[in-house]
Amino acid sequence: MTGLSLLGLPDDPCRTTTLLTGPKLHGNQRNATVPNPQPGNTKPNYYGAKRYATATNGMGLAGLEVKRSEVQILSARPMSIRDISLTTIDGNTTSLAEYSDETVLIVNVASRCGLSPQYEKLERLQRTYGDRGFSVLGFPSNQFLQELSSETAIKEYCSATWGVTFPMFERVKVNGRSRHPLYEELTKTPDAAGKAGRVQWNFEKFLLSPTDEIIRFRPPTEPDSPEIVDAIEAFLPQPAGGART
């Protein structure tokens, strides 16, 4: 054998090969295999993704044998917005994959903002469409210095003042270098005027369809505006008889 192809690459002894998992091996190691898991340890004894370069004067990986069943090939699938890790307001780890079949309205909220009465209309959307595969998702942010100082205080405020039942998440930054990865992706979407980039203010809204289409609405657009309601309706399965709510 004059070369090794784990990813369907030509068996070329003079190309650089990336061995995605396993300990560092050398070209003169014959009959080498990737180690099995240790007894009682369900996690394979891999050493992470290592770049294993072989140059090579025609020698390549001659004599090296690796059992395909013991080699972990990492997926090349790009990360989806639904794969981004999120933390709920109660401190639990989740992601938008939990809402993979749903249309969601993602809103950066703030308790001390002049737009906070939008909470009432957001909750109304939740109650109207929640049983049809829709959810509002609230992301508190102190980016504009108008949010409370703790998740506990935010949760109590939302429940007591607006009767919020839709999912809420921990405080995030929506702009700047330290913005949350979710907003790193969302802010690539342009608004109706074709402008992408920074979140303008609290209560900016991003409507995400089950097929990951995104529509952006700026803060002054009320949750019950025709633009938002029509977009939600368009993404949702129609009720029996085809009549809209």
Image (spheres, grey):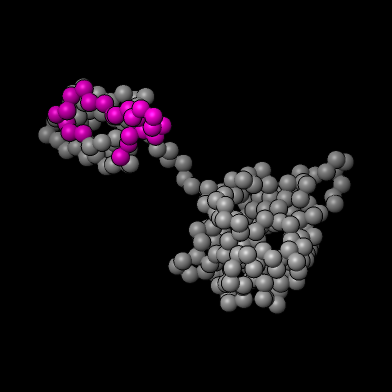
> Whole-percent x and y of residue 163?
77, 62
**Magenta stretch in the rendered image:** 25-47
Please say whether residue 36 is one of the residues in the magenta stretch: yes
Looking at this view, is 34 or 106 the one in front?
34
In the image, is residue 188 above or below residue 96? below
Q: Give the prevailing secondary structure in the magenta stretch.
A: loop
Please say whether residue 225 is one of the residues in the magenta stretch: no
Query: Which residue is depicted at the point 55% across and 54% down?
Result: 86
Name the side, left or right, on which 2 lies relative to 41: left
In the image, is residue 155 above or below residue 65? below
In the image, is residue 142 above or below residue 37? below
Q: Quadrant of residue 121?
A: bottom right
> Whole-percent x and y of residue 110?
65, 71
In the image, is residue 152 above or below residue 79? below
Q: Quadrant of residue 162?
A: bottom right
Q: Quadrant of residue 149?
A: bottom right
Query: Which residue is depicted at the point 33% across and 34% down?
Result: 45
Res. 166 in view: yes
> Whole-percent x and y of residue 71?
34, 30
Query: Which residue is depicted at the point 60% across and 64% down?
Result: 151
Q: Quadrant of the N terminus?
A: top left
Looking at this view, is 86 or 42 the one in front?
42
> Whole-percent x and y of residue 98?
62, 45
Query: Which residue is depicted at the point 19% across and 29% down?
Result: 61
Looking at this view, is 180 or 155 the one in front?
155
